[in-house]
Amino acid sequence: MLGCCQGKAVLFFFFLSLSPLTTCLLRRYIFKNVIDSHYQKELFDTMTKSRRTKQKELLQSEISSLTSFFTADELYENIKKKDSAIGIATVYRFLKDLRKRKEIHSYVCERKIVYSHNEDNHCHFICQKCDKITHFTINKIDFLRKQINGDICHFQIDVHGVCNNCLKKGKT
């Protein structure tokens, strides 16, 4: 009979040898039918921890060096100069994992997802006549804090109107 810790180690290494689909199906079966809830969480945490790889470390250091908003494509272009073996899918998966762990923020800008590792806001003024998009920064958000029950981490605001250029053209 295996001890508790030995049994977990055997299960963990058994899972590593299986295909992802088989692992997923077997994990569901075991969690539903075999393992009690105390060990279920511990085993799940062990199995879902992300491995530290050179590619992930390179991606993390590149993101840390960026000082403004960036897209996955921009990150990929920077990273492939350092390691041509990293694919765009790896970059997207890494960014998705960071978003899940709330280590990075994402916004929508001109129909693209942009990322930031800072807790910045992302604001646009969109002209209704010429469709020009202007970025601006809001430094004080006291007007929002009064309306929201909770802490604000980051935000995105799109303000629609008519820009000064279009207003001048309309008056002449």
Image (cartoon, rainbow, N blue to C red):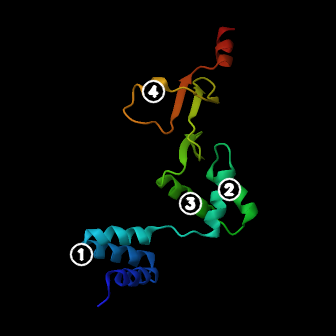
The quarter in which the C terminus is drawn is: top right
- Vertical relation: 41 (above or below) 101: below
Secondary structure at numbered mark 3: helix
In the image, what residue type sits under mark 1? Answer: Asn
Spot occupied by residue 142 in the image (x, y as percentages of width and height): 48, 24
Secondary structure type for disc 1: helix
Q: Which numbered disc flags the more N-terminal residue, 4 or 2?
A: 2
Q: Residues within 10 Å of mark 3 (few under 14, many from 20)?
A: some
Q: Check the image and report above or below for 68 versus 62.
A: above
Tag 2 secondary structure: helix
Q: CA distance from mark 2 to mark 1?
A: 43 Å
Q: Nearer the viewer, mark 3 or mark 2?
A: 2
Label 3, on which residue? Answer: 94
Determine the residue positioned at 41% across, 25% down. 146
**How far apart, in angstroms, are the residues tagged by discs 1 and 3?**
32 Å
Q: Which residue is mark 4?
A: 144
Q: Which residue matches tag 1? A: 33
* Type of amino acid at the residue the image marks with label 4: Leu
Hey, what amino acid is under mark 2?
Glu
- Taking the view exactly as shown, the residue that stands out farthest to the bottom is 1
Q: Quadrant of residue 108?
A: top right
Q: Residue at x 63, y 49 (%)?
A: 71
Q: Which mark is residue 62?
A: 2
Which quarter shows the N terminus? bottom left
Q: Position of residue 9 (x, y in %)?
A: 40, 82
36 and 84: which is toward the camera: 36
Residue furthest right in the image: 81
The three-letter code of the residue at mark 3 reads: Phe
The image quadrant of residue 147 is: top left
What residue is drawn where x is 59% and y is 64%? 90
Residue 125 higher or lower than 55, as above or below: above
